[in-house]
Image (cartoon, grey):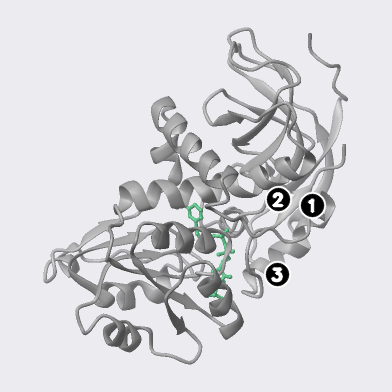
Amino acid sequence: SSVALPKIQKAIIIDGVSDGYDVIKYKDIATPTIQTPNDIIIKNKYAGVNYIESYFRKGIYPCALPAILGREASGVVVDKGTNIKNFEIGDKVAYIGNCSMAQFTKIDNSMIMKLSSDSTNEDLKLYAAGILQGLTALSFVTEAYEVKKGDYILVYAAAGGAGLIFDQLIKARGAHVIAVCSSDEKLQLAKENGAEYLINSKTDDILTKVMEITDNKGVQAAFDSVGKDTFHTTLAALKNKGTFVSFGNASGPVPPIKISLLTPKNIKLLRPSLYAYTKDPEDWNKYTTELFSLIQTGALKIKINDAVSLEKYAELAKKLESRSTTGKFVLEIPQ
Ligand code: NDP
């Protein structure tokens, strides 16, 4: 039987498009209700913070306003539609879904993962922190470019939330991580997480360094989340037949390019999102099982910063976008 939910809840919303932070509001809004037989409502405990929220706020990715932010969380199932057979009220879960920076979130049945009933708050924090970026890195090193032993792989933002996971997974596949970060402190952290070669984007020329490291051959693949500022550097840093995985816009979106730029080296260019790799049930089961095992065995570490209460999200957004952070931030949701 379902739990009676309060009619009004707290949430983080944006009510406009802006490069600034004033459009971020901590507000009372209506609690979601079950509308279709496939809906599930989660009472959130922790919500992960991701760089993508800045793209919605800045209008890089369009969305209807006002919009509740947040793309992942963990918590407890509190209500469900009649078609939902694989989850029960009271189940502890982690999920990828929209509107997670709120006390309650309605999602469908697709990207949700059951956690064991004895999961602690620390476990809930860990899975809220790891699910989106973990599945991104895991699916990308498997499908966007299948990283192989001995490869040289260029990783940008290598001390960020996603970056630290990329470093570890690429190292675990026996490849050489060439990490790019904007400070030596960040590079040191990337090194502790598996990076072998370190490039400081403030003081080094990225292309010159990559060519030194790879004996002038270039890298087999690059995971570039910086976007606009690094596109041409990354293209030049790739080896003949290399793979360019462009997957973020931290410096702004990559402007339209001429596809003939890919021709001289027969470059494969992808602009993937994690969703197309994870939303089908078979993919979801495969990747969540693998991620769960990597985290449980300690093979993959998630560097989580101190949890911050939901209402303080705007401060975190500011920090994340100022390039001053490393690792992952989670928001603690008032219960
Ligand atoms: P991070 O913790 O990595 O923070 C962003 C980092 O980007 C900064 O710390 C900074 O690292 C780097 N950066 C480079 N240039 C700039 C710039 N001009 N302004 C601000 N930051 C810059 O964030 P996340 O781990 O949440 O995300 C990392 C990237 O991966 C993002 O671009 C995100 O959009 C992308 N992503 C894409 C997904 C997809 O499905 N396509 C899924 C998940 C993440 P430094 O100072 O060291 O350069």
Q: Tag 2, which secondary structure?
A: strand
In the rendering, which numbered label is found on residue 14? 2
Q: Tag 1, which secondary structure?
A: strand
Taking the spot 40% from the left edge, 46% from the top edge, the residue there is 139
In the rendering, which numbered label is found on residue 240? none
Q: Tag 3, which secondary structure?
A: helix
**Quadrant of residue 305 within the rendered picture:** bottom right
How many neighbours does mark 1 have within 10 angstroms: few (below 14), some (14-19), or many (20 or more)? Answer: some
Q: Is residue 272 visible?
A: no
Residue type at the position of mark 2:
Ile
Query: Ligand 1 near label 2 (Cβ, under 8 Å)?
Result: no
Question: Do residues under tags 3 and 1 come within 8 Å of each other at their CB atoms?
Answer: no
Question: Do residues under tags 1 and 2 come within 8 Å of each other at their CB atoms?
Answer: yes
Residue 95 on image: x %, y %: 61, 35
Quadrant (top left/top right/bottom left/bottom right) for the C terminus: top right
From mark 3 to mark 1, how far is it between C-alphas? 17 Å
| Residue 51 in the image: above or below residue 239 | above
In the rendering, which numbered label is found on residue 25? 1
